[in-house]
Amino acid sequence: MSAAASATAAVVTADAFLSHWLGHRRLTRRVIEAFPDDQLFTHSVGGMRPFGVLAMELVEMAGAMVRGVASDDWQKMSDHDKTTAIPKSEVLRLFDQSTAVMQEFWPKIPAERFTQTITAFGQWPGKAYDLLLYVVDNEIHHRGQGYVYLRSLGIAPPAFYDRGATD
């Protein structure tokens, strides 16, 4: 296969990418739900950040990245200090809000934008698809930390392969 042919070969459609990511969001939400409210921002293993802090990082990254790729608006999702404990219900509300922003702005991303080199948040250059994949990878990584925390608390985490209904 020539370089030109491989550059134009689509591995996954934009809609399939979003659907896959939303499956991860559903699973991550269930991990947040599984945490006891009093442990979300306090429990840690091996010096890792508490899962509430990680969850707030996921809140901040997902919606803002999709909105930024779609519109070049790189504002943060909120002014909340992600290290400050808030009730689990508020984390879930903000997580859902971030997911809604993803769903709102994803259809506004022109197909050619995915392969353009951009600078996210004024500091991270890369192809738009690479930056989006980084946010998905980061979510999976932090969710894995959440699984370790839940198990250390004696709580069975949701099945890692069950990402719920497709969108």
Image (cartoon, rainbow, N blue to C red):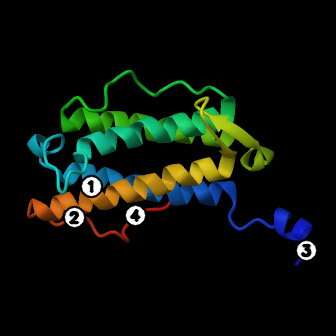
Q: Nearer the viewer, mark 1 or mark 3?
A: 3
Q: Where is residue 88 in the image (x, y as percent from the top left)?
A: 20, 38
- Which residue type carries mark 2? Pro
Name the image quarter holding the N terminus.
bottom right
Alpha carbon distance from label 4 to label 3? 36 Å
- Which residue type carries mark 1? Val
- First in residue order: circle 4 vs circle 3: 3
- First in residue order: circle 4 vs circle 1: 1
Alpha carbon distance from label 1 to label 3? 43 Å
Residue located beneath label 1 in the image: 31
Q: Which of marks 4 and 1 is in front?
A: 1
Alpha carbon distance from label 2 to label 4? 13 Å
Residue located beneath label 3 in the image: 2
Residue located beneath label 4 in the image: 163
CB atoms of marks 2 and 3 within 8 Å = no
Residue 58's disc number: none
- First in residue order: circle 1 vs circle 2: 1
The residue carrying pointer 4 sits among few (fewer than 14), some (14 to 19) or many (20 or more) residues within 10 Å by Cα, namely some
